[in-house]
Amino acid sequence: MTLHPLYGLGDFGTNCYILASSDGLAALIDAPYSAAAISKKLDSEGLRLKKIFLTHGHCDHIEALGGLCEKYGCEVFISPGDAKMLADGRLCLSEYFGTPFKPFYGASELSDGETLSLGDISLKVMFTPGHSAGSVCYIARDFIFTGDTLFEGSVGRTDLGGDMNELLLSVKKLMDLGRNYTVYPGHGAPSDLETELKFNPWLGPLRN
């Protein structure tokens, strides 16, 4: 499994991550901004996109979803808590932010704790509500895709339908994994769990 990050896409500066299997298949963590930009990277690496794993359903993480599925015919996965966002411009905040939106139907719903596989790619699903009701993280061998649950030096905003107490409980679940995973967030630079627990100003309650 090889990781190909794409950082700071679009007006929201959203990250996504291509996971490549040894046999040329690819899974994508989130689908922001432009299908063309993501396709360009996939095609340059000679990869066939088969699955898209969404960390949550907000508009800045799903803008490229329709275009990518039209081109590659890939499967899409999202938690039950955010599934309705894919077909509703109000729920996904597209109407709020005034961003382009194309409804998507037919995503598969995830289960907490399940393992997702594609070739030699393997990810464990952890439900981490707080930023949104259906936020999830994906745990790989030594890194975690945290979406908008945990950032370098910050956490996801909770003023648009989230809950800060719930989010901190979710971050505690990550810290309780007992290993210093590298963190690949939905925005900003990578970090790691130990650094965030020690220095992230939002995680003070978890240090007590």
Image (spheres, rainbow, N blue to C red):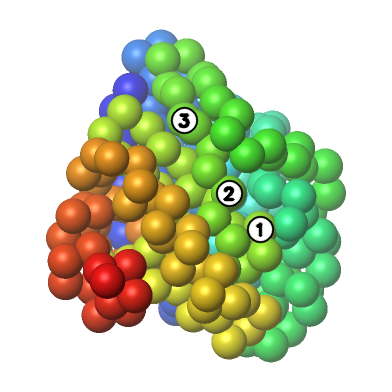
Of helix, strand and loop, which one carries label 3? strand
| Of the image marks 2 and 1, the number of the one nearer the N terminus | 2
As drawn, 8 above or below 146: below
What residue is shown at x 61% (from left), y 76% (from top)? Answer: 162
How busy is the neighbourhood of tag 3: few (under 14 within 10 Å), some, or many (20 plus)?
Answer: many
2 sits to left or right of 58: left
Query: Which residue appears at 47% of the width and 41% of the height?
Result: 138
Residue type at tag 2: Phe
Quarter of the image with the N terminus in it = top left
**What is the distance, in whole Å, between disc 1 and disc 3 at their CAs?**
17 Å
Label 1: state its secondary structure: loop
- Badge 3 is on which residue? 123
x and y percentages locating residue 180 in the rendered image: 21, 44
Quadrant in which residue 110 is drawn: top right
Q: Against 45, is 129 above or below?
A: below
* Tag 2 and tag 1, C-beta contact below 8 Å: yes
Q: Which mark is residue 134?
A: 1
> What is the distance, in whole Å, between disc 3 and disc 2 at their CAs?
13 Å
Q: Which label sits in the foreground, 3 or 2?
A: 2
* Image location of residue 98, percent across then percent down: 66, 86
Residue at 24% in and 54% down? 193
The answer to whether the residues at label 3 and label 2 have Cβ atoms under 8 Å apart is no
Q: Residues within 10 Å of mark 2 (few under 14, many from 20)?
A: many
Residue 127 image label: 2
